Amino acid sequence: MVKQFRDGFHDLLNWFVNKIISFLEKEKIPKGYAVNIFKDWAGCCGYLPLGVAIEIEGPNSHAIKDLDLKIYSKIIEIYEKEKISIMSVNHSKFSL
């Protein structure tokens, strides 16, 4: 099955962020911790489609590292399952 992303990279980012959010909703995030997902964030030069940044905040660095590893593992799983290659992303058109 091939998924088409009409708006190219922007649609891919939305799809990817939704996958990560779904995972985080099922995952037990410890009380007192926050996971922030930034998509297409702006830099000094304005709004740029830079991709996704995931920030984890909380009081214990060990718990943050554990959560970071779970999220990273999920990202790899998504890439492998959907056969996404970072090198093959064409910002004008993308399909799985």
Image (spheres, rainbow, N blue to C red):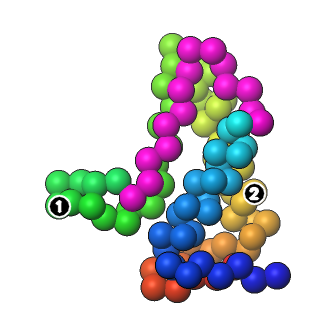
What quarter of the picture does the N terminus occupy?
bottom right
Say which residue label 2 marks: 77
Percent coordinates x, y for residue 49 in the rendering: 37, 66
Q: Compared with residue 61, is residue 3 higher up or lower down, i.e. above or below?
A: below
Q: Amino acid at mark 1?
A: Cys
Say which residue label 1 marks: 45
Percent coordinates x, y for residue 81 in the rendering: 79, 66
Query: Residue 75's quadrant in the figure?
Result: bottom right
Give the Cα separation between the discs numbered 1 and 2: 33 Å
What quarter of the picture does the C terminus occupy?
bottom right
Q: Compared with residue 25, is residue 28 higher up or lower down, i.e. above or below?
A: above
Q: Amino acid at mark 2?
A: Glu
Which one is nearer the viewer's eye here, 42 or 57? 42
**Which residue ends up furthest to the left in the rendered image?**
45
Which one is nearer the viewer's eye here, 15 or 82? 15
How many labels were placed on the picture?
Answer: 2
Report helix, strand or loop for mark 1. Answer: loop
Left or right, residue 79 beside residue 64: right
Specify whether residue 34 is painted magenta.
yes
What's drawn in magenta, residue-wise? 26-40
The answer to whether residue 73 shows anywhere in this view is: no
Q: Residue at x 54, y 33 (%)?
A: 35
Which one is nearer the viewer's eye here, 6 or 24? 6
